Amino acid sequence: MHAYRSHTCADLTKANVGDTVRLSGWVHRVRDHGGVLFIDLRDHYGVTQVIADSDSPVFAELEKVRSEWCIRIDGNVLARDKSLVNPNLPTGEIEVFVRDIEVLGASEELPLMVFGDQEYPEETRLKYRYLDLRREKMQDNMKLRSDVVASMRKRMWDGGFREYQTPIITASSPEGARDFLVPSRLHPGKFYALPQAPQQFKQLIMVSGYDKYFQIAPCFRDEDPRADRSPTDFYQLDLEMSFVEQQDVFDTIQPVITGIFEEFGKGRKVDQTWEQISYRDAALWYGSDKPDLRNPIKMQVVSEHFKGSGFAIFAKLLENEGTEVRAIPAPTGGSRKFCDRMNAFAQKEGLPGMGYIFWRKQSADSIAQERGITVKEVNAMIKSGEITLGEEAAGPLAKNIGPERTEAIRQQLGLNVGDAAFFLGGKPKAFEGVAGKARQVIGDELGLTDTNRFAFAWIVDFPIYERDEESGKIDFEHNPFSMPQGGMAALEGNPEDVLGYQYDLACNGYELVSGAIRNHRPEIMFKAFEIAGYGKDEVEKRFGGMVNAFQYGAPPHGGCAAGVDRIVMLLADADNLRDVMMFPMNQRAEDLMMDAPSDPTNEQLRELGLRVLPPEA
């Protein structure tokens, strides 16, 4: 027999009754029933119940074992009594009577329990990650991640791509985030960098004549952490193709992503048609460039209804250039209680509040007030059919702007009795973020968001440039390496009108994919950077390797990268990337388990020619 096991803890069935077997694993749970011990023995594959009573030669030794001890047992497979069968376990029809035991690794008192669903502080979970990873949910998440990556690889190979590896130690390159710098021992005073992405290398692979590249690539960025972003490193499905246009990239990656979500999405609906939405429309309709389309709410501009109105705040605001008022429709949200709740939400977000109107059925009170008669008279007129109760707009905003304007707003937004609308005004960039959050809260609270669906949309037509309001200087708003739509001719006009062949894929409120058709023409690249104030010499200094390569017959090319961690996070129904990464950092970019970052030794610093300055007060 094998030294440690003849079967895994998921293998044994009724067909094995009478067999002598050997199992190894961790003590998941111990139950002492007065002279009879029941132990759930767990390994990576499953759980088997093992038992011992006073007839067992190792009963006394079994009494000593505790949770998470690693043990090996020998025993006989027995059939469980019908009344004791556990239909939720593959091994639920059998149990193993223990004849021999070996303790392979005893455990000290546990800082967190593996059995059960107890919640523990994140710091505890990360410090004792090896215990946290033993928990069933984490085992499932990591298996899911591994299976997703394997499926991605297979789908890319089936699509005619080959996998090529790019360097991990490279030159520093400004790509929108801070680099992790690596000091060079052989070149004192100089530094390498960990790659933020394989961007330049994959483009150089295209210049080198390799038509289709992909890689499950590690990327390193010194970023501020968020729930959906790692502060140090992450993985992406990186791909690049030659002789392609934007739609070719979409047609290539869509079946890969769709297939992954169909394979691992636990039966949830996966959108087959992916809408293409311009960046500006996404900001207007959803307040975000990664909208959650499971929520059907679309915001609209309603400025014309407030110009010169009795609501002085909006009326005066609209006299300033570049301002507008937007409405967030809230179907079924037409109650004062809900409106007050959303107003409180806006105040938590740092705003004075959020204007609202809600529509309700007219009351006898409001008609009496409007006509200057008594409620009794109104009720009599209703009874006689002289008056029919219609609808009315309620809320402070409605009173200020009057019934004609509120009715025009209702008509524009397609709302009815029982619905509401919320309003934000100013320069769009100043309030779009809050408006987007409010839209999401409204959709969730009113049950409008379809939670049993993966909804995808391509966000396209990103502006390449933006103008700083204070200095008036033009700078890059998005990827400077995207090919401008219209090529060189587009760069001759107003920079703020220049759009790039850049695109993101949004799914359920997250950015899953980002990519572009690359600017492979040196003359167009130099002109694009010149508009943003970067001279030819500076471009050649920063991106010399790529610029030089483009002078030797570069093909048109483009591609994208899909975030592996975010995809798995969505599939696993996790709220945080750290639940789908094996050994993540905490929110302060610290590895509590391995004690990183750590202080270098004096010997290491001398060897690298470095000196550490004390932090500034």
Image (cartoon, helix red, strand yellow):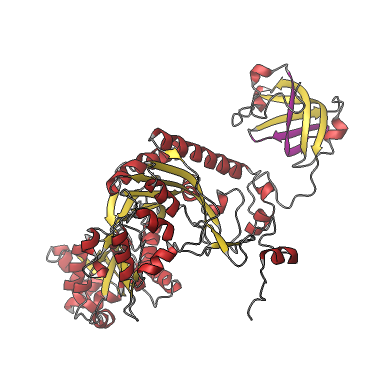
Residue under the point 40% across and 69% down? 538
In which image quadrant can residue 360 be found? bottom left
Q: Residue furthest front?
A: 552
Residues shaded magenta: 20-44
Residue under the point 64% across and 29% down? 10
In which image quadrant can residue 304 be found? bottom left
In this rendered view, identify the residue nearer to me: 464 or 611.
611
Question: Quadrant of the image for the C terminus?
Answer: bottom right
Residue under the point 27% across and 72% down? 325
- In the image, taking residue 104 as reference, residue 246 lies left or right, namely left
Question: Quadrant of the image for the N terminus?
Answer: top right
Q: Position of residue 384 (x, y in %)?
A: 13, 64
Q: Is residue 37 magenta?
A: yes
Please determine whether, in this image, residue 560 is positioned above or below residue 478.
above
- In the image, taking residue 208 as reference, residue 573 lies left or right, namely right
In this rendered view, identify the residue nearer to me: 329 or 10.
10
Please determine whether, in this image, residue 310 is positioned above or below residue 222.
below
Q: Position of residue 343 (x, y in %)?
A: 39, 71
In which image quadrant can residue 400 be found? bottom left
